[in-house]
Image (cartoon, rainbow, N blue to C red):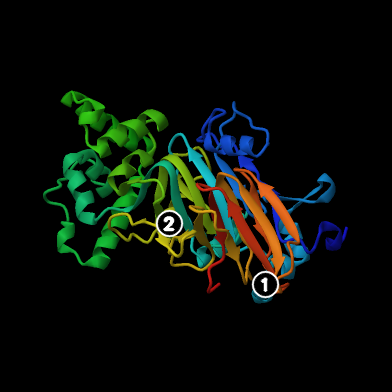
Amino acid sequence: MTLEALQRGAACYELECPVMHYDWGKVGAETLINQLRRKNGQTVEPDRPTAELWMGAHKSAPSLVRLPGGKTRPLHELIAEDPAHFLGPHLAAKRKPGLPFLMKILEAARPLSIQAHPDKRRAEILHARDPENYPDNNHKPELAVCLRDLRALIGFRHAEAVHAFFRLVPELGELCSGEFESFDAGAAVRPELLNKEQKRSWLKANYQNLMNATPVEIQEAARAHRLRLDSYGLSPEQMSIEDRLFVSLLEQFGDRDPGIFSVFFLNYAEVPEGRALFLRANEPHAYLEGDVLECMAESDNVVRAGLTSKFRDTNTLIEMLDYESGPPRVLGPRSLNEHRESYRVPVSDFALSRLQFRTSEPLVLKEYDRPGILLVYEGDLNVSLTGTDGSSTLERGHYPAGSVLFLPGDLAHRKLILHLNANTGTVVFEATVGPEF
């Protein structure tokens, strides 16, 4: 079957996107992903946990392109057959055919694993060594935009703050120092006297000891701290957020998992709707709950070491973390014009914008020379196509909430212009590559 038979000249392709049913996902007909799928006329499985909706071309779960006659083809196959059309001539000439980015909706009813994503060099090593657990050789920086109620652990606290927890939770200090009978927080190394590199080494040494402690050692420390908390007679609301999280994780994952003590090492963040976290390579994090729109480099590499029943690679995680410390960086969108807000990220693999229609004025996409994915998040979107020579409308389409569209990267090359029209209140997310990619 040739690409001519697949409407090679199409300016907009509708995608069918796979749903991932991981056990930490949300159950019910009213989950965000299920709501969007129902609005778009798709079937849902309300009794299964709905965890992620993948929008992209990654081989682990590629989106399907709807074609004439009711047929579908995986997006990555079409890109490989005609990269100049789907990626655009500029991008196709620069790199091995493949979509550089991936967009997801993620819904977490309970915590995900303590994890990090490798940089490019380490991803190549991990994929060559263990392709089953590390399915590609790409890095995975990502942006996580809060859609609803995002709570997360992200990045290391300052060493001084971690050391303060050793005083409050002496069992933690014992686990981290390796001195299970003689630890004395007052006599231990004081991080405030260390320089930046020494503090990073201090964090690594202590976190390594924690994550490599035996299940029995973790259990003894966890039970001792839980007994102490019970003796205080405090309600959950009266506890510190760290102790409250510790108890919650202990009850969910048991008292033998070192990840339950990570709450004392990693920053806790509550992210307001519309704000975002940028997760750089080699940065530890764990979503605790919430609905998130993720945009990332095209990769499925995750290194885990706690709060999970999946494959753990503790030694790799310990070695790859950068041990940078400080409060989490919560990003807000910046307004570019009346329709578009974007999130500034320090990578070029992807760029994410939020398109809002506050008036009846259309959004005109001129000189569209890169691939893009549009998610109609709220409202309904009308798409029309004209030529740059002022020709009449060549194509029209109406897409309700939940629709996902792929825009090929050769529109500018073919001298085509897209016009996006919507009622007031419509919200569309656009993922594409950064201008410097």
- The residue that appears at 68% across and 33% down in the rendered structure is 43
Task: Say whether residue 35 is left or right of residue 244.
Answer: right
* Front residue (pair 433, 208): 433
Local packing at callout 1 (Cα closer than 10 Å; few below 14, some 14-19, many 20+) is many
Q: Are marks 2 and 1 in contact (CB under 8 Å)?
A: no
Residue position marked by numbered label 1 in the rendering:
412
Q: Quadrant of residue 245?
A: top left
* Front residue (pair 88, 173): 88
The answer to whether residue 134 shows anywhere in this view is: no
Q: Quadrant of residue 407?
A: bottom right
Q: Quadrant of the C terminus?
A: bottom right
Q: Position of residue 153 (x, y in %)?
A: 36, 46
- Specify which label sits upstream in the sequence, 2 or 1: 2
Q: Nearer the viewer, mark 2 or mark 1?
A: 1
The amino acid beneath tag 2 is Leu
Q: Which mark is residue 279?
A: 2
Local packing at callout 2 (Cα closer than 10 Å; few below 14, some 14-19, many 20+) is many
Q: Position of residue 170 (x, y in %)?
A: 19, 40
Q: Position of residue 94 (x, y in %)?
A: 64, 76
Against 336, residue 245 (above or below) is above
Furthest residue to the right?
A: 1
User: In what element is the residue under mark 1?
Assistant: loop
